[in-house]
Image (cartoon, rainbow, N blue to C red):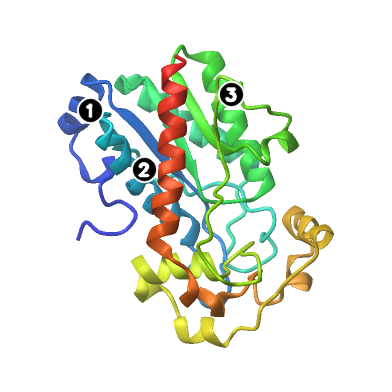
Amino acid sequence: MTEGMFKDTMVNMNWTEIKSYSDTNALVLIPLGVIEEHGPHLCLGTDIYIAHIQSIFIKKLLEQEGQRVVIAPPFYWGVCQATGSFIGSFRIKKETARDLLYDIIRSLIEFGFKNIYGINAHGDIEHSVAMIDVFKKISEDYSINCRYTFYKDVMHHYGLNGTEAFICPITPQKIKINTSEYQDVHAGDIETAIMHQFYPDLTDINKAASLPPVSLDNEKIMTWLYGGHTESLSPGGYLGSPADFGTVEVLKHLNNLASGISTAIIESMSTE
């Protein structure tokens, strides 16, 4: 059984295969996520499954451009701030997450890899802060190209401008891939659709179809993201409209997302 989030990753390789990648200057993608609740209809591993799926799509496009690519073991012990009050959301200290990811990337460097990119599918603020800290520290400690892929429209909130050596700035997706009027903040239509497409056994579509939409204004969304009030704002553990999953064009979404990220990676490597 080689399916699941270890499919096409280093986990299913032997050490000589990994050496062949490092010897040929392959680029490494690290899927980043957490184990947290995703409503009553999705599994706890939704974010890391999706980060892995995105990495596979990105890998394919980079390989079409002649770049050799290998996917590192998915890192799923990130930070759960927003949903931390729910059962199922594993609360890893930011320091623990930072130290663990640093050691993983350090291992990749010791294997001989010189181009490493983090592919994140978890929108928690403190999680991104921790990930950014790690990629910044790696860039300070080692003379390699190690970057966190991060959307241009939010990086200013983190004191970033996209010119940092540890950031790979990504243009936000602009195409229309769904018809729901409710933003998928957490476990909404888009995440539900992706999981149903690739992991139908882990997606309760009957439950999803029965769930009423949950929508918050921008101020309350920020309150939700900062955590502490998640259950009172979204008692079901989701924010969006899971029932609209059938309107999402999953492959169009993933291909477009991968195109933007792979283009950004290639551009960032050309500046090295």
Secondary structure under tag 1 reads helix
- Please name the residue that numbered disc 2 is placed on: 58
Using the image as rendered, state which of residue 216 and residue 178 is in the foreground: 178
Judged left or right of residue 233, residue 133 is: left
Tag of residue 21: 1
Nearer-N-terminus badge (3/2): 2
Cα–Cα gap, marks 2 and 1: 17 Å
Q: Are marks 3 and 2 in contact (CB under 8 Å)?
A: no
- Mark 2, Cα crowd under 10 Å, few <14 / some 14-19 / many 20+, is many
The C terminus sits in image quarter = top left
Cα–Cα gap, marks 3 and 2: 23 Å
Using the image as rendered, state which of residue 153 and residue 103 is in the foreground: 153
Secondary structure under tag 2 reads helix
Farthest front residue in view = 175
User: Which amino acid does the dot numbered 3 rest on?
Assistant: Lys
Nearer-N-terminus badge (2/1): 1
- Please name the residue that numbered disc 3 is placed on: 136
User: Which amino acid does the dot numbered 2 rest on?
Assistant: Ile
x then y, percent, for residue 98: 57, 35
x then y, percent, for residue 16: 15, 29
Residue for point 26% across, 36% down: 63
Question: Is residue 268 depicted above or below 229 in this figure?
Answer: above
Residue for point 35% across, 38% down: 72
User: Mark 3 or mark 2: which is in front?
Assistant: 2
The N terminus sits in image quarter = bottom left
Nearer-N-terminus badge (1/3): 1
x then y, percent, for residue 209: 53, 85
- Mark 1, Cα crowd under 10 Å, few <14 / some 14-19 / many 20+, is some
